[in-house]
Structure formats: C-alpha cells, structure tokens
C-alpha cells in the first residue's frame, strides 16, 4: 500500500481553500492508502505566531481535520513538533539543497513580500523542512493544492541530490496528487490572489468555522464583474472572480465548471450567489458542528495528536537514522 503524507499549518482557521485543495482529498485517499496527516506547527512559526493562539489553532485545526472525515485511528494524525525526526532530516536537507534552488521558490517571494531582508531564515528554508516531512516517512504520494507543486519538485531535487551525493537509492521520488477542480481557490476580494487563512481580511475567505450568516454575507459581497455568467468555460477567460466562484461551486457540487455554466450561464450573479451560498452552507455546516463538539471535550484532541505522534515516530526514526548513517554521523552503539 502506498504511503501518503500531507500537512497543513495551524496559522489561522482552515479555509474553504484548505478544504477543497487539501483536506477533502485527504479523506478520499484513506480508502486505499496508508495516510499520515500532520498539523505543521514548525512551518507555522516561520511567520510570527502568538504562542497562546498557536496552541489554540493547533487544536482547532486538528479537530477540523477529524470533523472533515480523517480517521485518526485507522490513519495517523499528529503535530509536527512532537516528532524530532522532521528537524533532524531537515537540517541534512538544508545542507543538500542549493541556495539557487531556494531562490526560485515563488512562495517565499510572495510571503516575504518587499521586505525580504526582514523575513525569517525559517521561511527561506521552509521547502527543505517540507521535503523532510515527506521523506522521513518514505512517503511517495502527496496531496496538495496547485500552489505547492513547486515545493514538491524541489523535494524531488533534494532526494535525487542526496541519493547521488551519498551513492544510494535511499529516498524515493514523490508524486504530487493535485485534484483538477478547484485546485486553487482564490480570494473572494481579489480573484488573482489565493484564498489564505492568514489574509488580513476575513471577508476574503470562508472559514470552516463560519456560521450560515457569515457564509451568506461573504458570498453576497464577493467581488464579481458586471457581465452575466458565460455559457461555456472559455467565457471565463480574463474574469478571475467569476471563474473562482464557478470553480468553487463545481468543486463543492462534485461537477465541472462546464455543467455549472450549462445551468447558470446567461444569468446575473445575484441568483448564482444565493445558490452557491446554500451549497456552501450545506457542505460546511456539519463540519463546523462536529469541530465544536470535538473541542468541547478537554484534553481529547491533545491525546489524539500525541498518540499519532508516537506512531509517526516509530516509522520516521529508523528512516532518518539510516539517512544520518549514510551522511556519516556516528551511530548509537547497541546496548
Ligand atoms: N486557496 C487555496 N486553494 C487550494 N488549496 C489551498 N491550500 C491552501 N490554500 C489553498 C492547500 O492547503 C494545504 C495546506 O496549506 P498550508 O496551511 O500548509 O499553507 P498554505 O498553502 O500557505 O495555506 P494558507 O491557507 O495560505 O496558509 P497561510 O495563510 O498561513 O499561508 C496545502 O496543500 C495547500 O496547497
């Protein structure tokens, strides 16, 4: 059975983008894979996180992932900081990856913005830690949103260079699993910007914890243009906001933009937005309710995460110990 690894940062409340681009696929993959899903708190602190908020968001995110349908008994759900193998391997990968490779990462450029000199060193080497997250488990299948494709290519470059430098075939190649519909959900305020849980504007995103009123209001106010919806997907060219809303509808309904437009093409946005809000509420309300229920039981989420971490460590430890042996680090003597 192939091993799947994927992670999500506790840097805010998970959004519809995280759900459609990642978590929904995580749930589906459980049927035929061995899955490790990780709340990547080490990644989150590459940008400033208030400590108390980080703790709360780590629990809330884990609860939301379970509420979406990830099964922490049959698969493994854990938080990254509880498994030191990630950092051990990331350091080796910092020494394998080339500065020129990291310089090409568009996510660093986006997140660091104009003030690059003031970005954390952690943000710069983020892709090395991400490669370690996956390769510490010899995972080969990684479900991510389209925005993470470049990082996975870099992870494969790192694996290849490690294998070459240390004359081994130790690390396998990774295959990104990117679902075509709504692989990239965009901001409700700007169709050219990704929907992000850390966007300063709450109106730009739908949070998995939003109630019906909030969802309806955000979709009603979502930016659109003055034209009616086109009858075919080609008509969405150059209309980023319209394309985004149609893409979200198609992804939530499990259909294609073409069939959404076959139904709504020629109409204005008002009616379409009502239908989209209804669909979104139907899909997200049960998730929000279950998240709330899970969080009401004190200590439960922590117990789930630490139990997952112990099982994750049992897989990662021998793999990372072997990487360290290949590098030339002394091995712990047998007792
Ligand atoms: N807008 C999106 N559309 C599709 N997929 C998305 N993902 C995130 N945003 C979208 C996918 O969610 C997974 C987890 O992402 P992450 O939390 O590790 O980091 P991110 O990609 O940087 O997500 P955010 O929401 O934008 O977080 P912040 O605001 O903290 O930077 C990934 O698989 C990602 O593709």
Image (cartoon, rainbow, N blue to C red):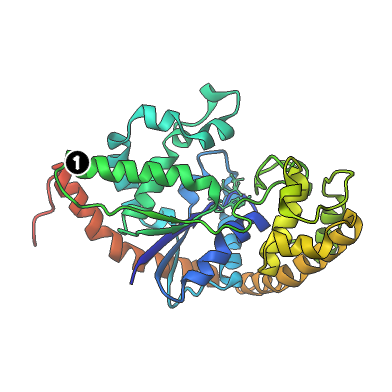
Q: Nearer the viewer, residue 194 or 285?
A: 194
In the figure, 60 relative to 159: above or below? below
Horizontal arrangement in the rendering, residue 280 relative to residue 5 (left or right): right
Q: Secondary structure at mark 1?
A: helix
- Residue occupied by mark 1: 164
Residue 197 is situated, as x and y percent measured from the top left of the image, at 65, 49
Q: How many marks?
A: 1
> Residue lying farthest left?
334
Inspect this view and state whether residue 222 appears. yes
Residue 229 is situated, as x and y percent measured from the top left of the image, at 83, 53
Residue 332 is situated, as x and y percent measured from the top left of the image, at 13, 53
Q: Nearer the viewer, residue 263 or 295?
A: 263
Residue 16 is situated, as x and y percent measured from the top left of the image, at 67, 58
Q: Nearer the viewer, residue 45 or 103?
A: 103
Horizontal arrangement in the rendering, residue 2 relative to residue 303 (left or right): left
Please name the residue shown 61% across and 74% down the image. 297
Please name the residue shown 23% across and 42% down the image. 162
Inspect this view and state whether residue 56 appears. no
In the figure, 229 relative to 295: above or below? above
Q: Nearer the viewer, residue 290 or 82?
A: 290
Is ligand 1 closer than 8 angstroms to the Cβ of mark 1?
no
Q: Tell me the quadrant of the picture where the N terminus can be found.
A: bottom left
Circle 1 Cα neighbour tier, 10 Å, few/some/many (<14 / 14–19 / ≥20): few
Instruction: Name the image quarter holding residue 259.
Output: bottom right
Please name the residue shown 56% across and 70% down the image. 66
Q: Tell me the quadrant of the picture where the C terminus can be found.
A: bottom left
In the figure, 13 relative to 307: above or below? above
Horizontal arrangement in the rendering, residue 316 relative to residue 280 (left or right): left
């Amino acid at each position: 059975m192939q091993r799947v690894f994927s992670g999500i940062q506790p840097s805010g409340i998970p959004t519809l983008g995280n759900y459609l681009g990642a978590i929904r696929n995580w749930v589906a993959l459980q049927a035929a894979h061995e899955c490790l899903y990780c709340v990547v708190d080490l990644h989150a602190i590459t940008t400033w996180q208030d400590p108390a908020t980080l703790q709360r968001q780590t629990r809330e995110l884990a609860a939301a992932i379970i509420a979406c349908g990830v099964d922490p008994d049959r698969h493994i759900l854990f938080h990254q900081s509880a498994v030191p193998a990630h950092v051990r391997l990331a350091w080796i990968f910092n020494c394998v990856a080339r500065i020129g490779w990291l310089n090409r990462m568009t996510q660093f450029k986006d997140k660091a913005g104009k003030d690059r000199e003031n970005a954390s060193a952690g943000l710069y080497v983020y892709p090395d830690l991400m490669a370690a997250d996956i390769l510490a488990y010899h995972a080969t299948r990684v479900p991510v949103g389209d925005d993470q494709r470049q990082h996975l290519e870099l992870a494969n470059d790192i694996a290849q260079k490690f294998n070459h430098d240390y004359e081994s075939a130790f690390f396998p190649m990774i295959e990104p699993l990117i679902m075509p519909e709504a692989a990239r959900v965009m901001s409700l305020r700007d169709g050219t910007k990704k929907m992000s849980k850390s966007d300063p504007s709450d109106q730009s995103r739908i949070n998995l914890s939003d109630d019906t009123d909030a969802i309806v209001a955000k979709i009603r106010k979502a930016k659109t243009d003055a034209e009616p919806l086109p009858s075919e997907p080609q008509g969405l060219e150059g209309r980023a906001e319209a394309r985004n809303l149609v893409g979200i509808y198609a992804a939530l309904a499990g259909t294609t933009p073409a069939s959404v437009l076959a139904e709504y093409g020629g109409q204005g946005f008002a009616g379409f937005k009502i239908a989209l809000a209804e669909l979104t509420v139907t899909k997200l309300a049960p998730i929000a309710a279950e998240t709330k229920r899970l969080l009401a039981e004190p200590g439960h989420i922590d117990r789930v995460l630490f139990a997952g971490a112990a099982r994750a460590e049992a897989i990662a430890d021998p793999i990372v110990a072997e990487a360290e042996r290949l590098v030339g680090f002394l091995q712990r003597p047998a007792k």
